[in-house]
Amino acid sequence: METLKGIQQNKMFINGKWVSALSNETFDVINPGTGEIIDSVPLGREGEAILAVDAADQAFQCWSEKTANERSSLLMNWFHLVLDHKEEIASILTAEQGKSITEARGEVDYAASFISWNAEEAKRIYGETIPASAQNKRIVVIKQPIGVVAAITPWNFPAAMFTRKIATALAAGCTAVIKPAESTPLTAIKLTELAHEAGIPAGVLNVVTGDPKTIGKAWLDDKRVKKITFTGSTPVGKYLMREAADSIKKVSLELGGHAPVIVFDDADIEKAVEGVISSKFRNSGQTCVCANRIYVQRGILPEFTEKLKNEVKKIKVGIGTDLDVNIGPLINEAGYLKVQRHVDDAVKKGAKIELGGKRMEQFQGGYFFEPTILSGVHEQMDIMNEETFGPVAPIIPFEDRNEAISQANNSDYGLAAYVYTESLSTAIKIAEKLEFGIVGINDGLPSTAQAPFGGVKQSGIGREGGRQGIEEFLENKYLSIRI
Ligand code: SIN
């Protein structure tokens, strides 16, 4: 087996050391574009998960007592190293996740932005003084790191979701144990190597690769773990929240989404088409914020559909390392089967395939799906009720503003929504009524380190990024001072 170039370590990182699994077992990492095995990593379980918490717990005092400037400057070292190794990280990302090298480079920049943003935020953890009700009293609120944090990161953005959680936790003064997704552990390992090289002390950041069930359970059961932060599916998020209740851990959950896009007939159609494409087809539709329900006002439906079709035809699908490829494969067979089921179910219930609709058989070994547009979609179809996580754009006509709002809000999910209109007044009125944590107004790519990312309803709890993100890793302590 050839080891992927650029990965010097393919081990777990516990207490500043690269280690194998206690059992010495490993599992393979597969390139989803080719089906080839690219590397193997340790198959950790409960024992390694506990060792990681031992290390993080021991390192907590020292790390949390560092000044904000000290933590910030170590994070800035990490940030520079990540950018210095951009090409290397991007090629690891493409190999294990499948996304195009262009998207992978973009993700490395995005990942790095969470490190630099939080390096700065470390210096802005301000407390508060509150006027007391008695002359001989003073009230001061200080913010302190919550403690050991357990982070479970997803496969769709193996670099950015790692840094979005870990840079924030570390900036706040927390230490961390992390389990990257089984399909994409190599990016996390590379980022950890760089964090170590940047001078982040032993025990502050610990990575355990392996079995999600036993690792997760060990962390949920361990009272020393004060917080769980997770990005992934809503059912797993619910499980974590239930189990975290036993020891009253804080939870931050970034879960599924089913983003509506509402295109009004006064919209700039080119802008709307461009926005839908960047939201829908980014990462082959495998994002929690991607456009899943495209509501188009009746008056512009034919023109919008035609223009969208023309632009989607230009998307080049292929092996991520090919420089002219825009989007890569789906992550695995289960991902493909779900996308195909959504398309087949919609067609059976009356939808029309405007474009695409099936697996691209010319790519042996990988699960590549044609960029797809469906029209004539209605609410009884599975695609309208479940997250697709694939490159399928369903178009649904609407008549008026009230209908658009009620259809868009008719979902258990509430992560991102998008509105296209040239009327400022319509945009604001609609945005205020949408039951979502993020609203893109004439903007298909709202994600950025400076803003609070997160959902309402069953899309999650808590925010990542922005000045709000670091609050999730802090406790408020109130000092009542009698003078
Ligand atoms: C996600 O899909 O989980 C994250 C997407 C983003 O940060 O834009």
Image (spheres, rainbow, N blue to C red):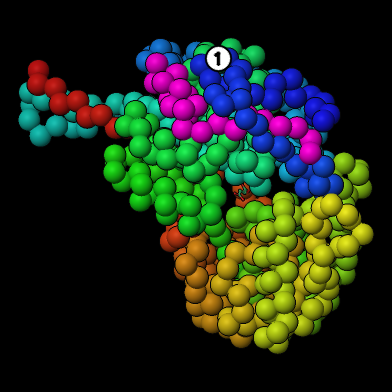
Q: Position of residue 290 (x, y in %)?
A: 65, 59
Front one among 390 and 411: 390
Residue 386 lies left or right of residue 362; in this view the side is left
Read off the residue under disc 1: 16
Secondary structure of residue under mark 1 = loop
Q: Is residue 181 magenta?
A: no
Q: Quadrant of the C terminus?
A: top left
Q: Position of residue 337 (x, y in %)?
A: 70, 64
In the image, residue 399 above or below residue 31: below
Q: Which residues are magenta?
A: 37-58
Q: Position of residue 415 (x, y in %)?
A: 52, 58
- In this figure, what is the number of numbered marks? 1
Residue beneath the point at 49% across and 20% down: 204
Q: Is residue 52 magenta?
A: yes
What amino acid is at disc 1?
Answer: Gly
Residue beneath the point at 62% across and 51% down: 446
